[in-house]
Image (tube, rainbow, N blue to C red):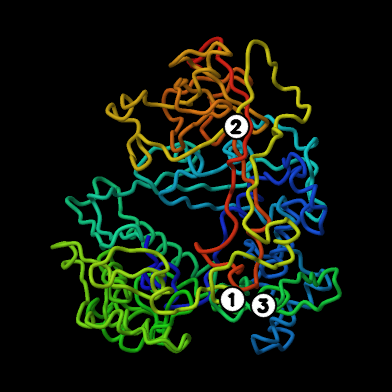
């Protein structure tokens, strides 16, 4: 999705309160699924550097990154953050800065526990989990078997033993790994995916042709609409309507069980803010052991007080809040909000429902939300685009407003883009231009308008002098060859390797025949290039272990096992196998031969492999930004064993 400023305000409720509680998924699931327990060993590539950070366990490093303010960390503390603020108020602390200093002192004295250091404490479990439109368990969740075992409490199909794995030093580890941390798992989806099969509740969702929505990406220059051809059938609801009704019932329950209160929100040192110079010279000073003071917003995260009005969540969800008048934006670009608020009153209409939102711009339906986004975003409203460029002029000293001038009268509506998809207007939150009909190309505004790059030097950077980057030997762009050791070589004896087998590098690239297909179980899709789950293997490798084209095979390592059909080809290099991702195991998957369970997904033999250099924060471009900069779940360096299945067991009993 193109980062439309209006979309962010609507999605994150920035018109009512700030900051939002954003968490990077890589770190969250690494701990929530207990994958930190199963690290194989220090990479040989790291051992040769022998520095201060390169041999730290990834979980220990992630915990350090959280307490230094580099990364978000939710849940925040083992103690309830609502109660912590209440205790501070009872001590007479009135100002937000006083509460922040009070919290810093409690943390320093270890009277408050970081939840990230106690991931197996039941108070820190993600007990109620809403999964929206993502096939988390069958597709995107790297380390599927860990998700199934530790997060969902499903059958134990993890082949590794945590006791024989590399363990962190600063993380409190329960003797027996918890299984089934989630009490209630709700999916909002129109597909019955693997995630749906694991869910306690599946809420029926409208498809594209049954709801109103908009779409745009940085890869094409147009804003596209979705229009409902029919109303959602039976009990299905659009995403907007489903969450609106959930907020309605939640607010009713909150009147008796969760009154309005204050919350303490811990935020990382953010990209495109003054936080980028919070920790200068790329030196790491850990307040826990390096003799520096824990200072909120400097050597640790920022602490902010947020007023939670739980009984009025429904009214806040369905109206535009007053804070939009203070201005809004993205990536350090600020758009004045007074005129925007007045325009929204005219475009959306005035809310007449009794309650907190009465008299404010109405946001009751998906159409209202679309119109709000279109009006607030520079890509779809020329006034907003010009205002954004003027905001950037103040920072850079360059003349930039002319990039969007001539579009001041453009104010796309849903009807406009329904009649004809409209080309996006160039905005300063993106580095490319679409001025004068040119196609998008990144960094054109930097080179043609002399806008500094968002880096320490203001130029394209090839050398990074941060202590952690240097410690890993990555101060300059560096080629690192694939790992030459396998995650199965740890002495586990769960697998009997009889017959012929082969050690291979296992890759999961984008699927060719269905990556954007939601209905993979239909007849057309199951007959399109084999259908169901397949693994591609080099023809010479296949012949060496007796595999023929379309044979049933098994791929496994210490993470898990997957059963699929073989695609034998000359186009895959020797020593490598491909299993295109997004092949869900809801159909046509027999049991594996190891534990006789249904034979896994493409992510059954992968796992989250956090990269510590992605966790750096508070240092110019190395600063966290939601969906912008932070750790990713690198899982490509995976070694596995492939062999032919001797018999196919469909588990009919």
Q: Nearer the viewer, residue 193 or 482?
A: 482
Q: Residue at x 40, y 26 (%)?
A: 532
Relative image position of residue 646 (x, y in whole percent): 56, 10
Numbered disc in front, either 3 or 1? 1
Q: Farthest left residue?
A: 419
* Residue contact between numbered discs 3 and 1, judged by CB atoms under 8 Å: no
In the structure shown, which secondary structural element does the residue marked by tag 2 occupy?
strand
- Disc 3 and disc 2: Cα gap in Å? 51 Å
Relative image position of residue 537 (x, y in whole percent): 50, 24
Q: Which mark is residue 505?
A: 2
Q: Residue at x 76, y 69 (%)?
A: 284
* Residue contact between numbered discs 3 and 2, judged by CB atoms under 8 Å: no
In the structure shown, which secondary structural element does the residue marked by tag 1 occupy?
loop
Image quadrant assignment for residue 217: bottom left
Split into 4 quadrants, where in the image is the N terminus?
A: bottom left
* Residue contact between numbered discs 2 and 1, judged by CB atoms under 8 Å: no
Q: Residue at x 71, y 84 (%)?
A: 90
In the structure shown, which secondary structural element does the residue marked by tag 3 occupy?
helix
Relative image position of residue 474 (x, y in whole percent): 68, 57
């Amino acid at each position: 999705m193109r980062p439309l400023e209006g979309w962010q305000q609507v999605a994150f409720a920035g018109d009512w309160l700030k900051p939002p509680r954003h968490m990077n998924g890589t770190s969250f699931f690494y701990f929530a699924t207990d994958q930190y327990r199963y690290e194989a060993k220090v990479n040989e590539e790291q051992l040769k550097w022998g520095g201060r950070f390169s041999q730290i366990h990834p979980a220990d490093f992630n915990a350090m990154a959280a307490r230094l303010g580099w990364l978000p960390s939710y849940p925040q503390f083992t103690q309830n953050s609502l109660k912590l603020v209440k205790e501070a108020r009872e001590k007479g602390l009135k100002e937000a800065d006083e509460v922040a200093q009070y919290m810093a002192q409690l943390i320093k004295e270890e009277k408050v526990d970081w939840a990230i250091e106690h991931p197996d404490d039941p108070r820190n479990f993600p007990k109620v989990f809403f999964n929206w439109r993502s096939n988390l368990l069958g597709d995107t969740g790297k380390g599927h078997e860990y998700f199934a075992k530790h997060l969902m409490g499903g059958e134990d199909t993890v082949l590794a033993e945590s006791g024989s794995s590399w363990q962190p030093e600063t993380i409190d580890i329960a003797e027996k790994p918890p299984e089934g941390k989630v009490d209630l798992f709700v999916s909002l989806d129109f597909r019955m995916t693997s995630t749906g099969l694991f869910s306690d509740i599946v809420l029926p969702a409208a498809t594209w042709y049954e709801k109103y929505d908009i779409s745009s990406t940085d890869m094409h220059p147009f804003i596209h609409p979705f229009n409902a051809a029919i109303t959602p059938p039976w009990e299905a609801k659009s995403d907007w309507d489903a969450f609106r009704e959930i907020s309605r019932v939640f607010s009713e329950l909150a009147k008796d069980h969760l009154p309005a209160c204050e919350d303490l929100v811990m935020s990382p040192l953010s990209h495109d803010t003054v936080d980028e110079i919070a920790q200068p010279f790329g030196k790491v000073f850990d307040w826990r052991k390096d003799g520096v003071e824990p200072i909120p917003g400097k050597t640790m995260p920022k602490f902010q007080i947020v007023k939670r009005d739980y009984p009025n969540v429904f009214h806040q969800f369905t109206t535009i809040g007053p804070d939009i008048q203070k201005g809004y934006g993205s990536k350090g670009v600020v758009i004045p909000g007074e005129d925007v608020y007045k325009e929204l009153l005219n475009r959306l209409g005035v809310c007449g429902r009794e309650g907190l939102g009465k008299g404010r711009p109405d946001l009751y339906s998906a159409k209202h939300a679309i119109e709000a986004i279109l009006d607030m975003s520079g890509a779809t409203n020329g006034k907003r685009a010009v205002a954004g460029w003027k905001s950037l002029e103040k920072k850079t000293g360059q003349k930039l407003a002319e990039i969007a001038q001539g579009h001041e009268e453009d104010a796309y509506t849903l009807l406009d883009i329904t009649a004809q998809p409209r080309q996006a207007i160039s905005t300063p939150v993106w580095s490319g231009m679409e001025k004068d009909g040119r196609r998008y190309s990144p960094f054109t505004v930097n080179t043609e308008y002399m806008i500094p790059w968002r880096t320490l030097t203001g130029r394209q950077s090839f050398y990074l002098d941060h202590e952690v980057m240097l410690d890993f030997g990555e101060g300059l762009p560096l080629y690192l060859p694939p790992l030459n050791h396998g995650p199965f070589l740890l002495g586990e004896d769960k697998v009997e390797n009889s017959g012929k087998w082969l050690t291979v590098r296992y890759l999961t690239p984008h699927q060719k025949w269905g990556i954007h297909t939601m209905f993979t179980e239909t007849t057309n899709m199951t007959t399109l290039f084999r259908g169901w789950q397949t693994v591609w293997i080099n023809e010479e490798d296949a012949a060496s272990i007796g595999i023929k084209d379309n044979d049933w095979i098994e791929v496994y390592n210490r993470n898990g096992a997957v059963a699929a059909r073989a695609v034998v080809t000359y186009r895959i290099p020797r020593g490598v196998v491909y299993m295109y991702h997004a092949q869900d195991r809801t159909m046509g998957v027999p049991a594996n031969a190891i534990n006789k369970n249904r034979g896994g997904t493409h992510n059954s033999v992968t796992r989250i492999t956090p990269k510590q250099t992605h966790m750096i924060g508070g240092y110019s471009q190395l600063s966290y930004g939601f969906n912008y900069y932070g750790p990713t779940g690198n899982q490509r360096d995976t070694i596995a064993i492939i062999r032919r299945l001797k018999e196919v067991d469909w588990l009919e009993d």
